[in-house]
Image (tube, grey):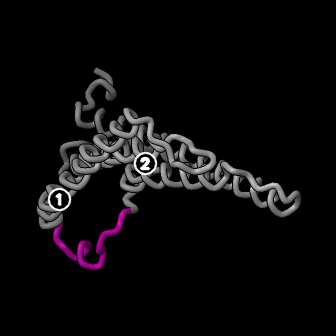
Amino acid sequence: MSPAARRSAADRFCDAVDALNARVGLVCSFAIAVVTGVVIWEIVARGAFARPTVWANETTVYLSAIAYLVVGGYALLHRRHVRIDVLYERLAPRTRARLDLFTFVFFVLYAGTLVWIGWEMAWASIQQGETTGTPWNPPIWPVKLAIPLAGLLLLLQGVANLLRDLGIAAPRAPE
């Protein structure tokens, strides 16, 4: 049997979640590049031609908000969320594992709330055809839909990290 075939379901799950959040992070990096381009366009249009756009401000806010929301899983993949390392690193590995299990309950409540309430908000926005009410007046549901998506990506990555931290899945390969 090949080494790939011997990998556990937990390993495959963790690798799939890691790959998903890595791809989301890559896509969002391009979204930030688009935001930069839109801001430059607006500056030139407003400053050089005295022709400001109606759409640039909301476009930058929308893309930035969506990117900010959905890259939470990417940040968690790379262990870039806030943690008090000064205390955490001084704990024994077994104590860290216990602390991780304890705090995971609160993490699940947080991410689950994002998914549940975020989905209700997004679905209501889609059904109502909600828009911003500004002169450009784009639909607002894409930003609201990013909330439950962010919660789901965060929750999946949290589960993957916990499986690895507890030794149920193999540690993530170094980059």
Which quadrant is the N terminus positioned in? top left
By secondary structure, the bulk of the magenta-drawn segment is best described as: loop
Residue 46's place in the image compared with 122, above or below, is below
Task: Depth check: give the residue in front, 39 or 91.
Answer: 39
Horizontal and vertical percent for residue 168? 18, 44
Residue 125's place in the image compared with 83, above or below, is above
Answer whether residue 85 is magenta in the image: yes
Work out whether residue 171 can be spotted.
no
Residue plotted at (22% across, 47% down): 112
Task: Depth check: give the residue in front, 82 or 13.
Answer: 82
Task: Depth check: give the residue in front, 52 or 143.
Answer: 52
Answer whether residue 23 is magenta in the image: no
Q: Is 49 positioned to the left or the right of 13 in the image?
A: right
At label 2, which amino acid type do we have?
A: Val
Between discs 2 and 1, the one toward the N terminus: 2
Label 2 secondary element: helix
Residue plotted at (77% across, 53% down): 41
When asked about the image quadrant of residue 82, the answer is bottom left
Residue 70 is labelled as: 2
Q: Tell me how far mark 2 sits from mark 1, CA to CA.
A: 20 Å
Horizontal and vertical percent for residue 160? 27, 45
Label 1 belongs to which residue?
A: 106
Residue plotted at (62% across, 49% down): 135
* Stretch of the chain drawn in magenta: 81-93
Residue 121 is labelled as: none
Identity of the residue furthest to the top in this view: 1
At label 1, which amino acid type do we have?
A: Phe
Asked if the residue at tag 1 contacts the one at tag 2, i.e. Cβ–Cβ closer than 8 Å, the answer is no
Q: Is 161 positioned to the left or the right of 74 in the image?
A: left
